Image: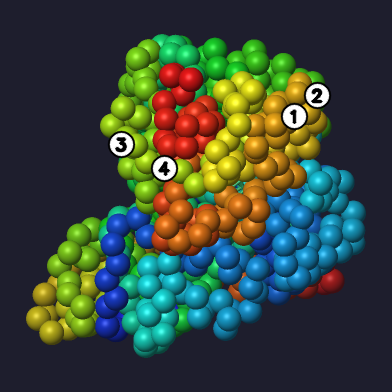
Amino acid sequence: MHAIEKILAKASGRTFVKAGEIISAKVDFAEINDLYLQTIKSFDEMGGEMVWDRNRLTFVFDHYAPAPTIKSAAIHQEMRDFAKVNHLTHHFDINEGVCHQVMPEHGVICPGTIVVATDSHTTTHGAFGAFGTGIGATDMATVMMTGELWFRVPEIIEIRIEGTPPKNVLPKDVVLSILGKLKADGAVYKAIEFSGSYIKQLDVPGRMVICNMAVEMGAKTAYMQPNDAVLKYVGERAQFPFEVHYSDEDFAFSETHHFDITHLSPQIAMPHSVDNVVAIEAVPQIKVNQGFIGTCTGGRVEDIAIAAKILKGHKLDRYVRLVVIPASKEVLQTCMKLGYIQDLIDAGATISTPGCGPCLGAHEGILAPGEVCITASNRNFPGRMGSVAAEIYLASPATVAASVKNGYISDPRQV
Amino acid sequence: MKTQIEGAVIILKDNIDTDQIYPGRYLELVNPEEIKTHCLEGVSPEIAKHFIPGDIIVAGRNFGCGSSREHAPIALKHLGVSLIIADSFARIFYRNALNLGLPLIICKGLSEKLKAGDSLSVDLTQSVIKIAATGETFDCEHIGEHALSILEAGGIKPLMKKRFQKKEGNERS
Ligand code: SF4
């Protein structure tokens, strides 16, 4: 069996599962973000009273943090009340950051566990060897009541990544290049294991970027075998006991894809599709109105650090904006200590408090018709960050920084 | 749930994501009657305006990709979509629709064979689709027993209600 199958087998009280089977599995941790008041409504409707385990369910207020409208403030209010009544052990209000960053930081994501959240980017937690998957409101309401959920055991695709990329070519470029080849539906209903020499040595933030974007290929979950960096990170934070699973040597993947990233160029996903990916050399001179560094994909310390390095001592053109939103309070505090926030403000960046910001077009930097944005986030669907007539280019934080520095989409290897 | 469905088609492309089905700026709405007015607004605001309840959506690959927002299937369901047929569905959307009792089936390549104004009659248990005007038929993928049982119950909510009522009853007895 694969490690993913072992996780599912254990959670469903079996010794063996195989692809295609429908199983009912115990959930180790569940998270609901502030777009999902619906979960509480469905929970009530289905006759729910108290949640199944107050230690294993949390709310993270990130999409509307802090509340931009009266309606979203009312959503927070109702969810806060529910958290209080249910005595939820963990509660992350508007001061904490994006769920996929906040949860690992607080040690609720552990290897070998099943994590569900009302958010498609829950695949991020494969970085820690967890089975993370996004679910909708009604599925979540059943988890709140029973602590269990049905799953179809997925086929598993292997993506082997070998080599070391050139300077200023980042994990985001690696995953964009894979997305460009496998396409937006390359892994629908399947799981992806990322492996190979690159993944073996990759640090925690880099692993999170790649697993985060696995969902853009349609994947149900992503998996990376925990390495020393992961075990150290989790070891310092874990709130629950955990077990690392290993795949059997004779496990057969449904497909294997090989990537060598030794000579990879920075990659750009052009509007309006995540898989419309080209190498930066093929991008003509495109003027940018706004850059965005932030989100569960590109808002970690490393992302902000590289932007600060590229922009330190430089002044942005007065008509070019750079919005920087650290993914969490911990990220913000670290970046302040290390001076990155100061450098970015000096260069002319706008800093907002941790949360999703304009990633899904809710607030804090949404786009006008005809505007061009280059962003370290994960989706460039029409209208994702505001007007449907805006153009969104996905790139690494280094490429975003180089681009706002020059005022047009630029190669970070040349700054 | 009806297992025989008839309706006129609305044809959509590949990769219709949930931001196009239900734009992020309306996510704070909670009333389905309000939610449905923005259905497919990212494709065209005209669709919801001219929609006739019972119409069938026929799309290309990867319908419902992107965000896990349940607003997307809620909007489609309350607008009166009777069935969604696509080359493939994104996983979370598929589950969400099923959980709400909104039927959806996979039929590869159907969207390319239809034109606006065509009507279909679909038999969900037999997995057969017929174009009303020409009588031409297509086989689609079988929905599967597990999914069919959820649809037949009208979604997950009635199933859960039943399960919890039973439990309480047992405890009392
Ligand atoms: S940062 Fe963007 S992608 Fe991540 S959870 Fe928030 S809205 Fe979703």
Q: CA distance from mark 3 to mark 2?
A: 38 Å
Q: Name the residue tied to disc 1.
A: A342
- Which element is circle 1 on? helix
> The disc numbered 2 marks a residue on which chain?
A
- Is ligand 1 less than 8 Å from the beta carbon at label 3? no
* Residue at point 50%, 67% (across, down): B22
* 3 vs 2, front mark: 3
User: In this orientation, does residue A8 appear?
Assistant: no
Q: Name the residue tied to disc 3.
A: A284
Q: Nearer the viewer, residue A382 or A91?
A: A382
Q: Name the residue tied to disc 2.
A: A337
Task: Answer with the quarter of the image where residue A201 lies.
Answer: top right
Where is residue A147? Give x, y as percent: 71, 51
The verdict on a common chain for dots 4 and 1 is yes
Contact, mark 4 vs mark 3 (Cβ under 8 Å): no
Where is residue A32? Give x, y as percent: 70, 53
- Is ligand 1 less than 8 Å from the beta carbon at label 1? no
- Which element is circle 4 on? loop
Contact, mark 3 vs mark 2 (Cβ under 8 Å): no
> The disc numbered 3 marks a residue on which chain?
A
Residue kind at label 4, given as amino acid type: Lys
* Residue at point 46%, 74% (across, down): B39
> The disc numbered 4 marks a residue on which chain?
A
Left or right: A265 as drawn, with respect to A387? left
